[in-house]
Image (tube, helix red, strand yellow):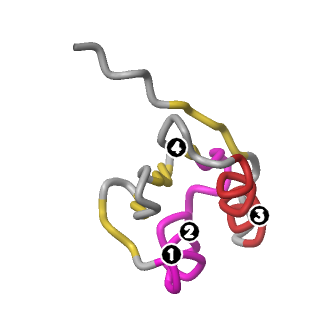
Amino acid sequence: HVVLSIQQDGSLYIDLAPVDSGQLQAELARAYQGKQEFPIIIKGARNLPYSEILQLVEICQHVGASGVELMARKAETP
């Protein structure tokens, strides 16, 4: 699986490696190569606007993702 993460501050990661938003589609396509039978998993910070998640879903579709799974982060417990 390929995991695409977005932090509360908007920073992006592909499989825990930081990626610049301008290079996201190219880097995601490279990471996803050979894994087309698996969905891309998007992990988003809890309070992100839904529109930001939708943009990531669209990018996943552009790189040919067979599916996209959303995974919300659990709230931090004190």
Residue 26 relative to residue 14: left or right: right
Q: Residue at x 42, y 52 (%)?
A: 7
Check if mark 2's residue and mark 4's residue have beta carbons within 8 Å: no
Q: Earlier in the sequence, mark 4 or mark 1?
A: 1
- State the image coordinates of residue 75 (x, y, percent, origin top left): 41, 21
Q: The disc labelled 4 sits on which kind of residue?
A: Gly
Q: The disc labelled 3 sits on which kind of residue?
A: Glu
The residue carrying pointer 3 sits among few (fewer than 14), some (14 to 19) or many (20 or more) residues within 10 Å by Cα, namely: some
Q: Secondary structure at mark 3?
A: helix
The residue that label 1 is drawn on is 30
Magenta range is: 21-40
Q: CA distance from mark 3 to mark 2?
A: 17 Å
The residue that label 4 is drawn on is 44
The residue carrying pointer 1 sits among few (fewer than 14), some (14 to 19) or many (20 or more) residues within 10 Å by Cα, namely: few
Q: Secondary structure at mark 2?
A: loop
The residue that label 3 is drawn on is 58
Q: Secondary structure at mark 4?
A: strand
Check if mark 1's residue and mark 2's residue have beta carbons within 8 Å: yes
Q: CA distance from mark 1 to mark 2?
A: 5 Å
Give the foreground label among 3 and 2: 3
Q: CA distance from mark 3 to mark 1?
A: 16 Å
Q: Earlier in the sequence, mark 4 or mark 3?
A: 4
Q: Earlier in the sequence, mark 3 or mark 2?
A: 2
Q: Secondary structure at mark 1?
A: helix
Q: The disc labelled 1 sits on which kind of residue?
A: Arg
